[in-house]
Image (tube, rainbow, N blue to C red):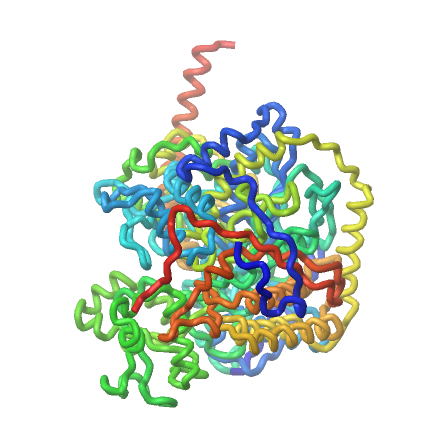
């Protein structure tokens, strides 16, 4: 296959960046999208040019490292990761536009590589269960109904790739946050921190500059792990509940300790 | 100890033999109480004093992530590194199958002792009894810990934890989270670590790569790291260093490892004096999707569970290129069922892998390049119906279809063995301490508790056992047993390492040759696969050593690394790693040449039973090979020859016997 590539090139965070055209020949339909970029890079290096920087690691669709916008779609035309997208999804002679994730909280580092540290900070704000090492109770002493365990699992499969943000017209991180909140708040182990978790995670999400959710649903369309849109509904429910709880707790406290 | 007068193959030519090495940390006496006694004998550090101590942890996978979270929770100041953009992306995330634990929830006769017994045997008697017993003991606590963290393990309708059985074991002890157990366990560790990062107890450096180790007064005291975004080199000093940097399967270029998985941290530590244990032990997994062409960058594993219902075959006739449906039943060779009637398609990994290679070497392989065998579900679909097969294996079939664009419900899948897990790594004692005091190695980065032939569902167990339960104890002991004078940032030991790292980067950037890093990596991988892969022999290994030495010279003359060191430069990152792989590859071949026996993952053609099975030679090789770096070779020049130290293996509880699957 012969292809025309238009790739976003940007030397570093402060560089302006621009689309650059490349012609590539000899692309096999069996190549993954990233292998196609590898092939281009081998050629660029030998021609004395700077290869295109892009993030990738496991190339099995599970680590969440890779992610580019292909012809306007996060991870491209199929609902999978860029590493599991194969060139047979394109046709000979096609023009392909390749850009980094676009969202203010994901600043470009170089070419197609962006900084998704905001996601780690959101998890750090409450996306965990406090379980000290070595003193955990017997595993089967916490029974979890199978439907709850399955729903928790379905949300826990989020790979944190950021496609939901890239696909959202508002640059919202609601699907990512909702997956974690739904996973942990569904479980009995997650109950003690249920309220503070959602409050802190949403607060951090806002502080990072992600946009609000307007129920467009593009996030679920591009999510390679098919995190359900319902999770956002659940996030909103959990958040409203947490706001009520927190307000109530403050009122009780104010009554007990009038200043 | 094996007969010391006998010479090893290659001795004097490629390596010399040094004094034996012993593990003096494992207590004697009852195996059941060894770890408890070791824990009790370990020094404690007053909680108020812990925050004064800095521990450097490199890697954030199951072992590193768990260690960082647990040490920070104890009160240590942890400085942690990963080369990925987030600790959540470590390659432990890709493990599929499950994690073993001796919970005996099924009342099917499982026990800690049985898990220990199965693992010593499955490890082909090349692991340490003390360590393996401790692993089995900790397995139970690992599940409890992960459940408490909210890891969504599979459950039964009753709400109790579900288990399944896994290759070659007669009890049902594998806990799992669909086909994504590694992901869920890693996310658990990552979340625990994230909490500590947010609390300020862990200083996290993502997109940073360790490039060298700093040793002061004979003890590991720090590392030099490169910021992969800015290229800036920085020095980090502390009281102990933990390497949890995973395996080195990418020495073969094509493997199931993530593209970034590398050997640099442990190899640089080896160059500074840490012994390297059993480098040649490589686990080759039989059920991988074959490569489709020269462009291929990595291989994808298919769960081994497929062998429960699929039948493996190749055409009887050489060079038969007919589509599988056109090959009549009597012209098919169901070779595993033919050679191993008792186990059939369910023979252990090493046997299934080698048998596939043999039929392909005979010219009976299928698919592009003849490097594949059929894994056929036609009978299973006839017997169970397509919906039942879809229910059981649907996600794997979909993955196969996505990668190959073939419909596995309509035509047999093609599979071929692939490099999966490396069982060698830095040699460590019972305390997971390397031969450099203060330098610890955990998870796949160490030479592994379970020895030669790792069983399924035990790698995750080892990573978490090391990280959650062993390191917190042994680091207390190490830190509590000595005084730590502050190391001055401008100490000569520090400056020397910094200079060397800088010079190496400058050298790589200055060669400006005519070959890309990947071209060298592919060539190395081909040599390793051909001569140090599934089957090895004397002549092949000698050839490989000579070819690798040539390749190393070429690399340092002809490699082309574009760009500068002061920016995100992925070619430079690769060049740094491939240079280390080339050196490690040579040591792997030397180790394989020396070990003239077939043992688990290592099959020496000269050592087989009359019917072609692996033959161990316990009298001569019942030891761990701990290799000492031979000299200070720099930038592609050969140092001195490596030195072989043998650690004798003693089996008091499980007695060696030949494996048989006929």
Taking the view exactly as shown, the residue that stands out farthest to the front is: B5
Residue B463 visible within the image: yes
B9 relative position to B29: left or right: right
- Classify A180 as above or below B455: above
Image coordinates of residue A136 in percent, x first then y, are 39, 33
Q: Nearer the viewer, residue B21 or A54?
A: B21
- Classify B72 as above or below B351: above
Query: In terms of image quadrants, where is residue B263?
Result: bottom right
Residue at 70% over, 43% down: B222
Image coordinates of residue B573 in percent, x first then y, are 66, 61
Image coordinates of residue B232 in percent, x first then y, are 74, 52
Q: Nearer the viewer, residue B52 or B177?
A: B52
Image coordinates of residue B629 in percent, x first then y, are 68, 58
- Classify A130 as above or below B162: above
B352 relative position to A132: left or right: left
Q: Nearer the viewer, residue B654 or B548?
A: B654
- On the rendered image, what quadrant is the C terminus of chain B found in? bottom left
- Classify B569 as above or below B62: below
Residue A98 visible within the image: no
User: How many dots with numbers?
Assistant: 0
Residue at 39% over, 26% down: A245
Residue at 41% over, 53% down: A216
A2 relative position to B12: left or right: left
Q: Nearer the viewer, residue B652 or A92?
A: B652
Query: In terms of image quadrants, where is residue B44?
Result: top right
């Amino acid at each position: 296959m012969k292809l025309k590539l238009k790739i976003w090139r940007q030397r570093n965070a402060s560089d302006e960046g621009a689309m650059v055209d490349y012609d590539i020949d000899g692309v096999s339909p069996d190549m993954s999208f990233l292998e196609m970029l590898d092939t281009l890079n081998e050629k660029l290096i030998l021609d004395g040019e700077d290869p295109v920087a892009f993030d990738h690691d496991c190339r099995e669709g599970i680590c969440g490292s890779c992610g580019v916008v292909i012809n306007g779609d996060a991870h491209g035309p199929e609902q999978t990761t860029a590493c599991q997208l194969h060139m047979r999804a394109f046709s000979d002679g096609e023009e392909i536009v390749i850009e980094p994730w676009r969202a203010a909280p994901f600043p470009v580092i170089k070419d197609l590589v962006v900084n998704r540290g905001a996601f780690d900070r959101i998890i750090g704000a409450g996306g965990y269960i406090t379980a000290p090492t070595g003193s955990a109770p017997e595993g089967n002493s916490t029974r979890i109904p199978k439907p709850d365990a399955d729903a928790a699992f379905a949300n826990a499969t989020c790979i944190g790739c950021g496609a939901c943000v890239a696909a959202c017209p508002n640059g919202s991180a609601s699907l990512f946050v909702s997956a974690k909140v739904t996973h942990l708040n569904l479980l009995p182990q997650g109950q003690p921190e249920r309220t503070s978790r959602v409050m802190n995670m949403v607060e951090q999400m806002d502080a990072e500059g992600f946009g609000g959710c307007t129920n467009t649903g593009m996030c679920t369309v591009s999510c390679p792990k098919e995190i359900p849109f319902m999770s956002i509904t659940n996030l909103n429910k959990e958040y409203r509940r947490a706001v009520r709880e927190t307000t109530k707790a403050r009122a009780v406290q104010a009554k007990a300790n009038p200043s | 100890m094996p007969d010391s007068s006998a010479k090893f193959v290659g001795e004097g030519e490629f390596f010399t033999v040094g004094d034996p090495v012993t593990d003096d940390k494992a207590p004697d006496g009852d195996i059941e109480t060894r770890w408890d006694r070791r824990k009790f004998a370990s020094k404690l550090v007053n909680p108020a004093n812990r925050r004064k101590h800095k521990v450097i942890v490199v890697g954030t996978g199951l072992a590193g992530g768990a260690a960082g979270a647990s040490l920070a929770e104890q009160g240590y100041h942890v400085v942690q590194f990963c080369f990925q953009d987030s600790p959540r992306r470590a390659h432990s995330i890709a493990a599929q199958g499950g994690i073993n634990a001796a919970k005996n929830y099924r009342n099917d006769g499982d026990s800690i002792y049985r898990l220990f017994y199965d693992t010593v045997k499955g490890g082909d008697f090349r692991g340490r009894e003390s360590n393996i017993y401790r692993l089995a003991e900790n397995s139970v606590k690992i599940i409890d810990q992960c459940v408490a963290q909210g890891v969504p393990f599979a459950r039964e309708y009753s709400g109790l934890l579900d288990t399944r059985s896994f290759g070659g074991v007669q009890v049902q002890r594998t806990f799992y989270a669909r086909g994504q157990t590694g992901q869920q366990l890693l996310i658990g560790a990552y979340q625990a670590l994230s909490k500590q990062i947010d609390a300020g107890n862990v200083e996290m450096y993502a997109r940073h790569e360790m490039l060298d180790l700093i040793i002061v007064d004979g003890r590991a005291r720090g590392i030099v790291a490169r910021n992969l975004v800015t290229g800036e080199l920085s020095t980090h000093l502390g009281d102990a260093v933990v390497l949890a940097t995973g395996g080195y399967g990418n020495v073969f270029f094509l493997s199931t490892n993530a593209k970034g998985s590398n050997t640099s941290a442990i190899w640089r530590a080896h160059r500074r004096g840490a012994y390297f244990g059993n480098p040649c032990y490589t686990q080759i997994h039989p059920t991988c999707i074959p490569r489709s062409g020269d462009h291929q960058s990595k291989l994808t594993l298919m769960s081994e569970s497929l062998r429960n219902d699929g039948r493996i075959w190749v055409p009887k006739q050489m060079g038969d290129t007919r589509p599988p449906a056109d090959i009549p039943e009597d012209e098919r060779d169901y070779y595993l069922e033919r050679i191993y009637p008792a186990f059939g398609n369910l023979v252990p990994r090493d046997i299934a892998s080698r048998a596939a290679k043999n039929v392909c070497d005979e010219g009976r392989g299928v698919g592009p390049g003849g490097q594949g065998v059929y894994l056929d579900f036609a009978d299973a679909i006839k017997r169970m119906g397509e919906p039942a097969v879809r229910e059981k294996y649907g996600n794997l079939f979909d993955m196969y279809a996505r990668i190959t664009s073939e419909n596995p419900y309509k035509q047999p899948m093609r599979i071929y063995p692939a490099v999966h897990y490396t069982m060698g790594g830095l040699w460590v004692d019972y305390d997971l301490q390397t031969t450099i005091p203060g330098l610890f190695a955990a998870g796949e980065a160490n030479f592994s508790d379970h020895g030669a032939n790792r069983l399924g569902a035990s790698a995750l167990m080892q990573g978490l056992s090391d990280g959650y339960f062993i390191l917190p104890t042994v680091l207390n002991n190490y830190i509590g047993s000595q005084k730590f004078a502050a190391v001055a940032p401008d100490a000569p030991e520090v400056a020397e390492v910094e200079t060397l790292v800088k010079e190496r980067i400058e050298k790589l950037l200055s060669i400006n040759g005519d070959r890309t890093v990947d071209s060298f990596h592919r060539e190395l991988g081909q040599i390793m696969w051909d001569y140090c892969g599934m089957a090895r022999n004397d002549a092949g290994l000698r050839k490989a050593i000579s070819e690798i030495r040539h390749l190393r010279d070429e690399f340092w003359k002809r490699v082309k690394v574009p760009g500068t060191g002061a920016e995100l430069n992925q070619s430079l990152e690769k060049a740094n790693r491939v240079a280390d792989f080339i050196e490690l590859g040579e040591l792997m071949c030397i180790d394989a040449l020396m070990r003239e026996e077939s043992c688990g993952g290592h099959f020496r053609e000269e050592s087989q039973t009359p019917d072609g099975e692996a033959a161990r030679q316990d009298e001569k090789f019942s030891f761990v090979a701990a290799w000492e770096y031979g000299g200070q070779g720099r930038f592609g020049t050969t140092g001195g020859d490596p030195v072989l130290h043998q650690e004798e293996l003693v089996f008091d509880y499980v007695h060696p016997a030949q494996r048989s699957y006929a």
